[in-house]
Amino acid sequence: MEEAGANIPPIKVYPDKYAGQIVVIDGAAQGIGEMTSKLFASQGATVVMVDIQEDKLKRVKSAIDTAGGGRAEYRICNVGSDTEVNALIEDVVGTYGKIDVLIHYAAVYPFIPLLGHSTEDYRRIMNVNMDAAFFLARAVLPHMQKAGYGRIINTSSGTLQLPDRGLSIYVAAKSAILGFTRSLAVEAGPGVTANIILPGLIRTEAVWNNHVQPDGSHRLFDMLIQKQCVKRHGRPEDIAHTVNFIASPEAQFITGQIFDCGGGATFH
């Protein structure tokens, strides 16, 4: 769905924009991570896609290989495990010599009411969202500091300002990522930035299907559009293009910041 009355010029993508750069993206097997991987590869990057869903990673890699442009590889890794993350980063640096951009998308967001929320689910939600951000940053930062260049991009959520029932621990984890990334920016060092992408409600296939009502409607999407200044559904490419800017060399004077990409449903 396009926004009524809008007349947006074509988006230009430059095939050598990220030539020679190594971009690591977790949560890359589908949705926003898949779109971001394809965008960086189309601009000449070597993209290392990370996920636990190998079949889906193979499909995304095949699509990138067919399209041409950059190079796509993948690694299977549970980013909630510090030992697996350490091995992942050492493997990528050992193979390619560096990591220029690290993008942490992986997340879980089950709807569980606070009363009756198990400790096991609490730890799992915090682990995949916040623990992974810490493990990844801790592992990659020495390599970026040595190189004098790097971009670390973590993902928060529009639910920080528009929380929904059943998402208390998810919102807590995404809030922690925000504070952690700002503190990371202070310690990052010359040439290294750390920023936060804050997606609104994005119409990925999984999210769209998860929010369908028995009558086929999508109440949450309809409600959010009423709050948004931009009157259309959010798309994976909206996030991918915003991240693409944050990851660029021209964003060198921006760090510790929130990039709210939610059509103006919330403000900071």
Image (cartoon, rainbow, N blue to C red):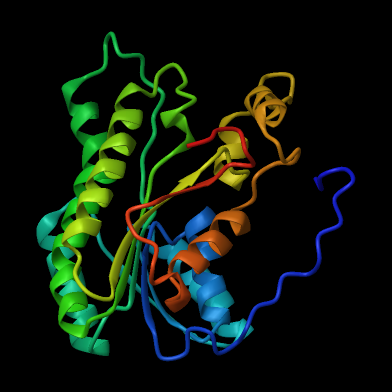
Which residue in the rendered view is the most extreme toward the left?
Answer: 83
Query: Residue 43 placed where, x, y %?
Result: 55, 82
Q: Quadrant of residue 253?
A: bottom left
The answer to whether residue 132 is visible is no
The answer to whether residue 76 is visible is yes
Q: Is residue 159 above or below residue 10?
A: above
Query: Residue 63 placed where, x, y %?
Result: 58, 75
Residue in the picture at 74% in, 19% down: 215
Residue in the picture at 52% in, 79% down: 41
Q: Quadrant of residue 10?
A: bottom right
Which residue in the rendered view is the most extreme toward the top?
Answer: 115
Residue in the picture at 57% in, 63% down: 241
Q: How many marks?
A: 0
22 or 64: which is nearer to us? Answer: 22
224 or 62: which is nearer to us? Answer: 224
Query: Residue 245 placed where, x, y %?
Result: 51, 67
Query: Residue 205 placed where, x, y %?
Result: 61, 46
Classify residue 107 as left or right of residue 78. Answer: right
Which residue in the rendered view is the most extreme toward the right?
Answer: 5
Q: Is residue 79 above or below residue 73?
A: above
Q: Is residue 205 above or below residue 95?
A: above
Q: Quadrant of residue 104?
A: bottom left
Q: Is residue 256 above or below residue 66?
A: above
Residue in the picture at 23% in, 89% down: 97
Classify residue 245 as left or right of residue 172. Answer: right
Classify residue 151 as left or right of residue 242. Answer: left
Give the quadrant of the N terminus. top right
